[in-house]
Amino acid sequence: MTAPRFHRILLKLSGEVLMGQGQFGIDPATCDRVAGEVKAAKLAGHEICMVVGGGNIFRGLAGAAQGFDRASADYMGMLATVMNALAMQNALEKAGVDTRVQSAIPMASVCEPYIRRRAERHMEKGRVVIFAAGTGLPFFTTDTTAALRAAEMQCDALFKGTSVDGVYDADPKQVPTAKRYDTLGYNRVLADNLKVMDASAVALCRDNDIPIVVFNIRDEGNLTAVLGGHGTSTIVQNEPVSA
Ligand SMILES: Nc1ncnc2c1ncn2[C@@H]1O[C@H](COP(=O)(O)OP(=O)(O)OP(=O)(O)O)[C@@H](O)[C@H]1O
Ligand SMILES: O=c1ccn([C@@H]2O[C@H](COP(=O)(O)O)[C@@H](O)[C@H]2O)c(=O)[nH]1
């Protein structure tokens, strides 16, 4: 059996996906389904850490548009990611997967603070570490958090589980004729201003040579398929230098 290309991965789970079929909040059945897929990935030998978004509850930009101070709204968004992290922890532990939540905003009675070396130790022991509260800083997003933690934890790849099945040449939700890439370079994403992920997250992955795998995690079984090298996704990586 050949070793999988990506052994240690950071899974960025979109907050919006946790709504399931709803319009807001956390759908426990969706959490359980994703937890089952994370468990399968662990059983297949992958080491996994996670960042969960907050878009199902609160986004700072949307709050600011409604009149909240932007930094306060971003802190509200970060707190939303803590709720999602606890929901995923609950689902994973129900499925028998040992987990730890580490928050970038210390909240000692709820979860551990983020301590990189401690997170590393948890992963060595086979636990799934869920990084909550983003970077702990306003004006960032959980995509950038995911890129940062993937670099800190020396992950082989960042898997962005979202509600589109890859990176398109335009937003597929706006442009139905948009074409999906199988692979493309970081610089193409940045130069074409493709909005599937923040520019800061893409640049951080580029500078640390961390491939980004964008896939639709709403499709049941897709995490397993994409980790196994089949299933639909786009891989963003350094383009080979031509001779
Ligand atoms: N070129 C593109 N290719 C693919 N998706 C794109 C593109 N441009 C914009 N998008 C949009 O990017 C979205 C995914 O990124 P987004 O940051 O909004 O979600 P997320 O990080 O998965 O969610 P959350 O904020 O809930 O955690 C898709 O829903 C898609 O509509
Ligand atoms: O480092 C961070 C990460 C997140 N935020 C705020 O949280 C929300 C939710 O995260 P999403 O990435 O949009 O899912 C985000 O809109 C920001 O308001 C942050 O400030 N800093």
Image (cartoon, rainbow, N blue to C red):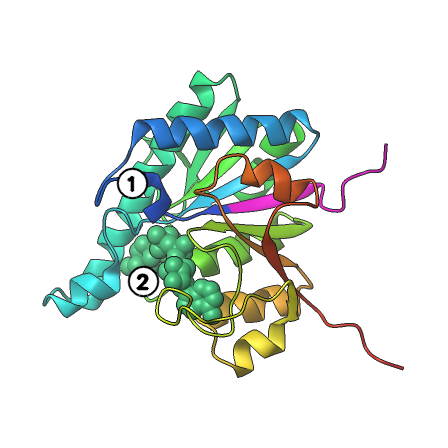
Helix, strand or loop status at disc 2: loop
Q: Tell me the quarter of the picture where residue 211 sits.
A: bottom right
Residue at the disc numbered 2 = 138
Work out whether residue 136 can be spotted.
Answer: no
Q: Which residue lies at the image location 69% right of the left edge and 28% below the top edge?
A: 44
Residue 69, how many percent across, how many down? 15, 66
Q: Identify the amino acid type marked 2.
A: Pro
Q: Residues within 10 Å of mark 1 (few under 14, many from 20)?
A: many
Residue 41, how many percent across, how many down? 62, 32
Answer left or right for 243 relative to 116.
right
Q: Nearer the viewer, residue 2 or 210?
A: 2
Q: Is residue 191 magenta?
A: no
Q: Which residue lies at the image location 20% right of the left edge and 59% below the top edge?
A: 73
Q: Quadrant of ligand 2?
A: bottom left
- Ligand 2 within 8 Å of disc 2? The answer is yes
The vertical placement of 81 against 221, above or below, is below
Q: Residues within 10 Å of mark 2 (few under 14, many from 20)?
A: some
Q: Which residue lies at the image location 56% right of the left edge and 26% below the top edge?
A: 39
Magenta stretch prevailing secondary structure: loop
Q: Identify the amino acid type marked 1.
A: Met
Viewer-nearest of discs 2 and 1: 1
Work out whether residue 57 can be spotted.
Answer: yes
Residue at the disc numbered 1 = 19
Helix, strand or loop status at disc 1: helix
What span is in magenta? Answer: 1-11
Residue 109, how many percent across, how many down? 30, 29
Label 2 with label 1: CB-CB less than 8 Å: no
Answer left or right for 237 relative to 192.
right
The vertical placement of 4 against 68, above or below, is above
